Image (spheres, coloured by chain):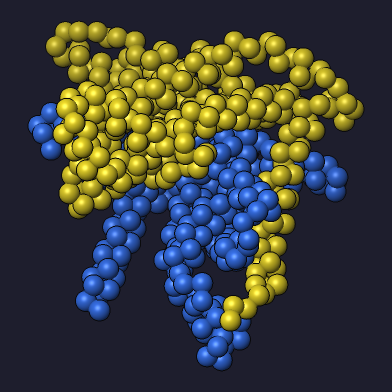
Amino acid sequence: MIKKTSPGYKAVVSPYLLWSILFVIAPMFFVAYYSFTGSDGAWTLENILALGKYTPTFVRSIWHGLLATLICLFLAFPLSYFISKTSANTQRTMVALVMLPMWMNFLIRTYSWMTILQDTGLINSMLAKVGLGPFQMLNTRGAVILGMTYNFLPYMILPLYSVMSKLDQSVIEAAQDLGGNRYQVLRRVIIPLSMPGIASGLTMVFVPSVSTFYISQKLGGGSFDLIGDVIERQFQQAYNYNLGAAISLVLMVLILISMAFLNKYSDSGGGVVV
Amino acid sequence: MKPISKLYSFLIFAFLYAPIAVMIFFSFNASNSTGLFTGFSLKWYGKLAHDQAVMQALSNTLILAVTSALIATVIGTAAAVGIDRWKKGIVRNSVMNVTNIPMMNPEIVTGVSMMLLFVFVGQLVGKKEILGFGTLLIAHVTFNLPYVVLSVLPKLRQTDPFLAQAAQDLGCTPVAAFFKAVLPAISPGIFTGLLMAFTLSLDDFIISYFTAGPGFQTLPITIFSMTKKRVKPDMYALSTLIFVGILVLLLAINLAQARSDKKKKRI
């Protein structure tokens, strides 16, 4: 006989529920609260109205984030596919190799790029030996996008690989047997079946790219102000928490919209494949 | 793999490891430049051991990572056990959605939102310097929790739902049945969650940056303030040591797993 679920099973969830209400839901509420109040605590729309000034920053962040995300997709797709085709042991090693850089502090990895790209850096001093350059690579748009691509590429490779390693080989063979050439098999079979991984990779790269602040400061040299930079300044330098909260609120809404958009175009149902 | 696929994979991995290789290389530099190599030296590693601020930050980071991972593992495992028994419905769905919030939200928003909560509470109780170890611990437990819940839940789904009942039929109290029958079955999931929580906490910068006070600095925050100025190879030495530490940890875990897999096969 199946016994009824004991009330104990409800009780053990309660610390978690309490924790989530206090430290996940309440903070969200405070973001909204601070957005609509002034420094004196009175209700105001001042912060929301001040957001118009930041439109170029928002557009720039989204644009840079999108570019980095697409580059990651194009770089990661072939690699994930190649990895999924190797033997089980090689797969494990290669996945570990993809994950290893993620355990390295991202501040240092980004800083290290700075020393590679700067005018007296590794690339330019090598070019100088053959009589070229120096080229300005640091403090450019390209450097910021490189930084995002570099830091978040594993977030694209891993979900793609995870879907591709489960692809049914016989489906691909069937497509080939039915006369599909390599391009058709890729477009009609492999890409559609990888959609959940693609969707999940896109969000996992876009979200941190669009909200970053360290990468743009170090590799963009302050000339590529992104949303993250503006938020960081409001909280750590200007101490205008209310304006900072309003910008964070917009960032949150922006990401919710992009995720809803992605979910609509994928069958993954919003679950993140890790 | 075809040669062209091999070449492509090699190039991507070269890209992923280039900055790390540069960092390790220059940590052995004799001069204080991070761009020009003048000779081999271990002096930066020696200097590091005498750097009070770095050593303090290292011990802070470890204390924080261990405590936050342990707390998150206990609360998260209990929650997963409960959620697993819940009927599918609105309540269960909304709990799972709340679990996803810290994973979906940009880290900067999570950090800022918690900072606002702490600052508000601080004003309420009249304590200006509220940010410190306590707030950092709360923040780290919060972002660790979803990873614990989501690594324990699949293990629970794999175990036989009648396992606890069988133990109870054999005379165990419900609590004993859980600890003697269910817990060993889901322990790999708990361990994965614990490890993930530990490494996430160790490495976190963005959320810590907004929830830490001047009195309690973690290593990533110290690194952040070091990179504001011109960096000397001592920071590269530090990073190299962290990298090697993580590499050893991961290898040890993999070896242990491979060994236990072998044992299982033999049985």
**Does A171 appear above or below A245?**
below
Q: Closest to the observer: A267 or A8?
A: A267
Q: Residue furthest front?
A: A178
Q: Closest to the observer: A174 or B33?
A: A174
Report the side of A86 relative to A116 (left or right): left
Chain B painted colour? blue
Residue B212: image x %, image y %? 63, 44
Report the side of B214 relative to B17 (left or right): right
Q: Is residue B78 visible?
A: yes
Report the side of A145 relative to B169 (left or right): left
**Residue at (34%, 14%) from the top-left corner?**
A137
**Residue at (51%, 76%) from the top-left corner?**
B162
**Residue at (9%, 32%) from the top-left corner?**
B3
Residue A130: image x %, image y %? 14, 11
Residue A81: image x %, image y %? 25, 36
Q: Residue furthest bottom?
A: B171
Q: How many marks?
A: 0
Residue B133: image x %, image y %? 64, 52
Chain A painted colour? yellow
* Quadrant of the image containing the N terminus of chain A: bottom right
**Residue at (42%, 18%) from the top-left corner?**
A67
Q: Closest to the observer: A190 or A42?
A: A190
**Does A16 appear above or below A180?**
below
Q: Residue furthest right?
A: A42
Q: Is residue B45 visible?
A: no
Question: Residue B173's quadrant in the figure?
Answer: bottom right
